[in-house]
Image (tube, rainbow, N blue to C red):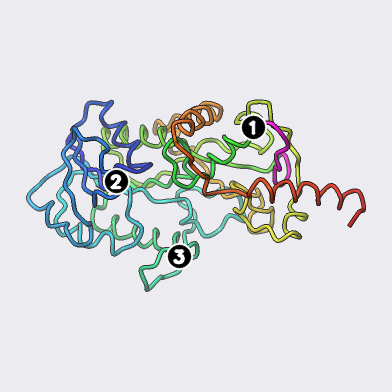
Amino acid sequence: MNILVIGGTSFVGRHIVEAALRADHQVTLFNRGVSNPDAFPELRHITGDRRKDAGKLSGLAWDAVIDTCAYTPADLAPLFKHIKTELYVFISTISVYSDYSNGAPTETSEVSDKHVENDEVTGETYGALKVQAEKIVMDAFGSRALIVRPSIVAGPYDPTDRFTFWAKKLAESGEALIPGSKPRKVQWIDARDLADFVIQQAEEKGSGIFNVAADAVGMEEFTTAVGSGQADAVWVDDAFLLREGIKPFDIPLWIPISDEHPEGFITVQNAKAKKAGLQCRAANETARDIREWLQRQENRQLKAGLSREKEQELIADFRSYNSGGD
């Protein structure tokens, strides 16, 4: 296949390119040349800003275009004047869903109906803007559109460090604060499993919408799988964390259990993707590979999670609170 990847040198896109190359496809990259510009020197690179330089794609045709980095309608409209392809793959997000109160959404569950006028991507607008972008893709390509909605993505090159935080922390000795209850659910997708699914679907000319996520597991099962047995888990309940001013996601993969989030996280149903061929590697494999990748990074400071000092302060205060010292 002749594939155009928009982006392709950072995280999800990088793994998609690697998966396409393993499958012996011809890959061209279109991006600004800012993130990891030295990646894939053997491939054809078309350098340009998708909003200003989409004309560089005129006259070219692709078996599939895989868009890894569109966040708003403004990221798409200029491209669609010039793109010619048999399949358009849009990487979206499970953040499009508007209601988790009745359990994990399916692909047909209600999505955000909030209309965002501006082009600013924030925690409040991210999901709604992705919904608007999905609609533009579907309107433009119809049965030639594939919408992929990943859960939180994990793996080497992850710039967010959400899963990485746990892979690192749970392999260290000493006490580790684990938020919430042992059975509360967490869910993710390894970027390499996501990439393999995307390339498989492109090969099969798949279309429609897929939630792409591993099976949700309890937090106790997650910490056991991801850790190396050295960390000493200290389970700290939601009520105490909220009392101390800790907000959702201040600790990666944690949302307090509530009517809005009864599972203590955002999880989705993945049966459709699994039936279509999604295969997910074990959590311990993802964690191991992340740790090996981290060892190759010089002085990398994680972007997610509490500081060690804040964590130990919370553990001490939690013990004092439970012993009646507060």
- In this view, the residue in front, 239 or 164, is 164
Please state which amino acid type lies under the numbered disc 1.
Answer: Glu
1 or 3: mark nearer the eye:
1
Task: Name, please, the residue furthest toward the bottom.
Answer: 117
Please give the residue where the numbered disc 3 appears in the rendered image.
125
Q: Residue 248 at what x, y percent from top left?
A: 62, 56
Query: Quick one: 121 or 97, which is closer to the camera?
Result: 121
Q: Give the residue drawn at x 34%, y 43%.
A: 10
Disc nearer the start of the sequence (1/3) = 3
Using a 10 Å C-alpha cutoff, classify the residue at mark 3 as few (fewer than 14 neighbours), some (14 to 19) or many (20 or more).
many
Q: Nearer the viewer, residue 43 or 119?
A: 43
- Of the image marks 1 and 2, the number of the one nearer the N terminus: 2
Is residue 141 toward the left or the right of residue 212 in the image? Answer: left
Q: Amino acid at mark 2?
A: Val
Crowding near pointer 2: few (<14 within 10 Å), some, many (20+)?
many
Most extreme residue toward the left, as rendered?
59
Q: Is residue 320 shown in magenta?
A: no
Q: Residue at x 23, y 62 (%)?
A: 77
- Image: magenta residue range: 173-182
Q: Position of residue 97 (x, y in %)?
A: 49, 56
Residue 266 in the image: above or below residue 111: above
Residue 175 magenta:
yes
Residue topped by disc 1: 172
Q: Which residue is disc 2 drawn over? A: 89
**Sequence order check: which comes first, mark 3 or mark 2?**
2
Quadrant of residue 325 within the rendered picture: bottom right
Which structural element holds mark 1? Answer: loop
Relative to 30, residue 140 above or below? below
